[in-house]
Structures are given as structure tokens and as C-alpha cells.
Amino acid sequence: MMAYGIFCESQTAYSLSLEYFNRTAANGADNGTNATAFLSTGQPVEGGRDQYYTQLCLASFLEWAQMASNQGDNSLYDARSGVIGQAMEYTAKYNLGNSVTWTPVTPATPIWQVTPPIATISTSNRGNYRPIWYMAYNYYHRYRGLSMPYTEQVMSSHVNEGSTATITDEVGWGSLFYCNTSQTVTAPSYTWSGIY
């Protein structure tokens, strides 16, 4: 909807997308809003389903935030203390083979083939990576100056740039499109500490 609003220069569609991004379960949201997709620690709700789908969810949120940022609005990236970036670090840490904390969670709406409450994180497709990491790193580390050590590890040794036979939702090329090393660091009003 946001892409449609931008392409068609429709402020109505663009504004509806922003309103949906901020919905909570109390006002009719499904699992696809900022407040329902991630716990405040960065734990992604989709983490209980499959690691491919966890990264698909993250990719969609990153693309959503980047579209808004291209319009001069960084509020999606920075929402809830940059929870999207925290979720990237959480997911990177787990997929690199490290332990993470998991808080049992009941999604706002059902997740395919997962029975709530989701008591544990899924090991399915653990260690397989979608090409999504540079977009998050460029914003949260290069622009906001936040530490992203696990994302750095994924980028340095695991990411396939470009589409693959098994994961083609994102084509990647983040090392080309999201590699602004000359931008001025602008610290956010939040910090990440003691997460996961």
C-alpha cells in the first residue's frame, strides 16, 4: 500500500499504510504490524514458525521502513526504539548458532502450522539466510551508530547477494544499494542494551 501511495502520489494510500504499521492487536491488527510482529526485546513472533519466514517478515518491515525513509520519514525505522533493528540482531544471533532468550507468545492472529502459545523458537531452516542484512545495517549502524555485531558476522560470511533457487522474495544487492559509508552518524533517542 505504501509503494502504491508513493508511485501514484496518493497521500491517502500512503497515510493508510502508516496507520496500519502502527496498529495494535486491540484495534484490529494481524501479525503484520510493528506492534504485533516483534516483542519489545526484538524477539520476532515468526521466530516460532521458521527462520526463512522470520527473515521474510523482517525483509518486509525493512522495505516498508526504507520506502518511508526515502520520503524523508525515519519514524518506521525508529519505531519502538528501533525494534526492527533489534529483531535483525536477535535473528542474526540465533541463526549464527548462538542461544537467545524466548518468551512464549500468542500471536495476534494464527500463524500457519503453529499452535499457540508458541513456547520455543523454531530450528527449521536455522543458519539459512535471505539477502536482507545490508539495509538494516546501513540505517541502524552507519546512520544511527548502533552496534550490530551479529548482523556484521552474517554479512561478512553468510549472505548470498542476488536471488537463489530457494529464496527469491528479496533479490538483495544490498551491498550495492545500502552501503552509504559517508553519511553523518545521527544518534537516535534510544539505545539497545540488555536485549535477548
Image: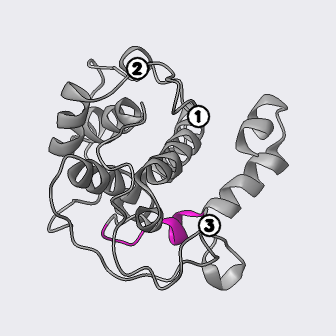
Badge number at residue 39: none
Specify the segment rendered in magenta: 33-41
Above or below for 109 versus 167: below
What's the amino acid at mark 2? Glu
Quarter of the image for residue 102 reads bottom left
Q: Is residue 36 magenta?
A: yes
- Report the residue at 21% width, 40% height from top: 145
- Label 3 to label 2, Cα distance in Å? 28 Å
| Circle 3 residues within 10 Å: few <14, some 14–19, many ≥20 | few
- Residue 77, can we see it? yes
**Residue pointed to by mark 2:** 161
| Circle 1 residues within 10 Å: few <14, some 14–19, many ≥20 | few
Above or below for 194 versus 162: below
- Report the residue at 19% width, 26% height from top: 156
Nearest-to-viewer mark from 1 and 3: 3
- Label 2 to label 1, Cα distance in Å? 12 Å
Q: Do the residues labelled 3 and 2 touch (CB within 8 Å)?
A: no
**In the image, 15: left or right of 93?**
right
Q: Point out the tag, 1 or 3, that comes first from the N-terminus.
A: 3
- Residue 147, can we see it? no
- Label 1 to label 3, Cα distance in Å? 18 Å
Secondary structure category for the residue under label 3: loop
**Residue pointed to by mark 1:** 169
What's the amino acid at mark 3? Trp
What's the amino acid at mark 1? Asp
**Residue 109 horizontal/vertical position (percent):** 64, 76
**Residue pointed to by mark 3:** 112
